[in-house]
Each structure stands twice: as C-alpha cells, then as structure tokens.
C-alpha cells in the first residue's frame, strides 16, 4: 500500500502518515453510501458567548458510555457501532485488506463523523485535546467522497496542505495534538459532499 510517511521518531517532519489508497475504490464507494445513512445531527456550538450552528453535520458511534464533549459545548453520546464501522476499525474482513487497528497498531473506541455538505462546511484551526481521549491520542482519519484540502501546521508555524482523497487514511500520531493544529478550510469552489471519520481512543465508558 502506498504510504507517505512524514513521521520519524528522531526528527519528525510532520507527525502524520498518509495512505492515499487505504481503501479500494469499490470499498470506499460502499462505505460512503453506508455513511450517508448514519444518524447525522446539526449541533450548536458556543464560542465567545455566542451560540451558532456547527458548520458541518456530526455523528458519534462507539463503545457504550464513551460520551464526548468538545469545545466545552458540544456533547455527543455514542450510538452503537454499525457493522461497517467496526469492520473498518477491527479488520474482521482481512480478505479485503488492512484495517485501521491492524495497520496502525493503535486502539480506538469511538469514531466521530463529520459531513461537509458543500464548500461552505468546514472545521477551523484546532487540536483535538479533549480530556476524554487521554493525554497523547493517536487519531486515524478516513476520507470519503469529494476531495477537500486539509491543512496541518506546527503551533505558530507554516501550514502543509494535503488533498484528502476518497478512500484515504491520514494517521495523526501521539504527540501531534500537542504540537500541531489542523483544519479543513471553507472553499468557494463547487464541491460535493465529503464524509470524514475520525477514529479516536477514549478513557471512559464500559468495555
Ligand atoms: O475532516 C477532516 O479531515 C478533519 C476533521 C477534524 O479535524 C476533526 O474531527 O477534529
């Protein structure tokens, strides 16, 4: 499998690994159709005393009790794993290729879905530092549908752009959330729907 590894223990260029062809096109298409039917919500976020709609749709699937709070205002309760999402995580169908746990060696207990309906949907510069994921989380991010620009930069540094392709996997390694910020900016170009699935650890809930 093609792999762009910018993560070196001694001198990390960027603490990420990108697999452009993680899923075959057939599997990626199948998974995209499945994900369109997930239970998407339009949540509200509170920023600087103002409540506004999150500029994308969201959903959370995961282990029982793994509630997720981000930006101190958006609270998500996990729905039960669908078979397709747990297969993607666990490698229950090894005949169709690598799966996230086997490939990365990291364990994940929740998956947050983001649906970008158009170029006006986005996620601004941030790091995923929510305490429920533990101190130094690895995050594995699968992209489906339209290609969007993903940017990552050292805090106070210059961004690097990735064009996250249909069926690709981007792994942000432990430490990345402490040293780097990332975003998917808005675009005025006409783009179709994009779905992103971020697999994350979680310190709470039952097993
Ligand atoms: O959509 C993406 O590729 C990134 C999503 C993201 O940054 C997040 O869920 O924290």
Image (cartoon, rainbow, N blue to C red):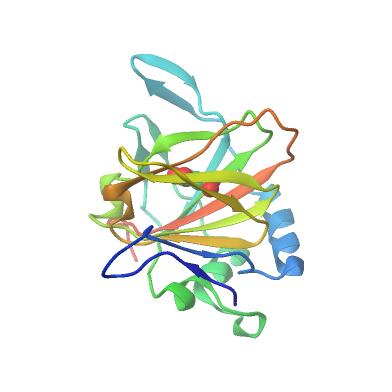
Left or right of 40? Residue 16 is left
Residue 82: image quadrant is bottom right
| Residue 45, position as x, y percentages in the image | 43, 25
Seen at 54% across and 74% down, the residue is 99
Q: Is residue 168 above or below residue 118?
A: below
Seen at 31% across and 53% down, the residue is 133
Q: Is residue 76 above or below residue 139?
A: above
Seen at 42% across and 35% down, the residue is 125
| Residue 124, position as x, y percentages in the image | 46, 33
Whether residue 37 is visible, yes or no, is no
**Which residue reaches farthest top?**
50
Pick the quarter of the image with the C terminus. Answer: bottom left
Pick whichever, 14 or 41, lies toward us.
14
Seen at 70% across and 55% down, the residue is 32
| Residue 10, position as x, y percentages in the image | 26, 69
| Residue 119, position as x, y percentages in the image | 66, 32
Q: Is residue 207 above or below residue 148?
A: below
**Which residue reaches farthest left?**
135
Count how many numbered circles sit on residues in the image: 0
Left or right of 195? Residue 91 is left
Pick the quarter of the image with the N terminus. Answer: bottom right
Q: Is residue 41 above or below residue 104?
A: above
Pick whichever, 106 or 17, lies toward us.
17
Left or right of 102? Residue 129 is left
Whether residue 159 is visible, yes or no, is yes
């Amino acid at each position: 499998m093609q792999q762009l590894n910018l993560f070196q223990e001694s001198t990390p260029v960027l603490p990420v690994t990108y697999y452009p062809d993680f899923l075959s096109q057939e599997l990626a298409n199948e998974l995209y159709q499945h994900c369109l039917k997930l239970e998407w919500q339009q949540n509200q976020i509170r920023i600087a005393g103002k409540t506004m709609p999150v500029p994308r749709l969201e959903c959370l699937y995961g282990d029982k009790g793994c509630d997720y709070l981000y930006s101190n205002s958006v609270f998500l309760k996990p729905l039960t794993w669908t078979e397709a999402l747990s297969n993607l995580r666990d490698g229950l169908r090894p005949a169709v290729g690598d799966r996230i746990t086997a490939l990365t060696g990291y364990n994940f207990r929740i998956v947050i879905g983001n649906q970008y309906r158009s170029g006006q949907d986005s996620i601004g510069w941030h790091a995923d530092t929510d305490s429920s994921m533990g101190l130094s989380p690895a995050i594995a991010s699968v992209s489906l549908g339209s290609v969007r620009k993903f940017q990552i930069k050292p805090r106070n540094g210059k961004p690097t752009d990735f064009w996250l392709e249909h069926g690709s996997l981007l792994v942000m390694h432990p430490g990345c959330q402490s040293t780097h910020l990332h975003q998917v900016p808005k675009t005025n170009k006409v783009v179709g729907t994009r779905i992103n699935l971020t697999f994350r650890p979680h310190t709470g809930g039952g097993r």
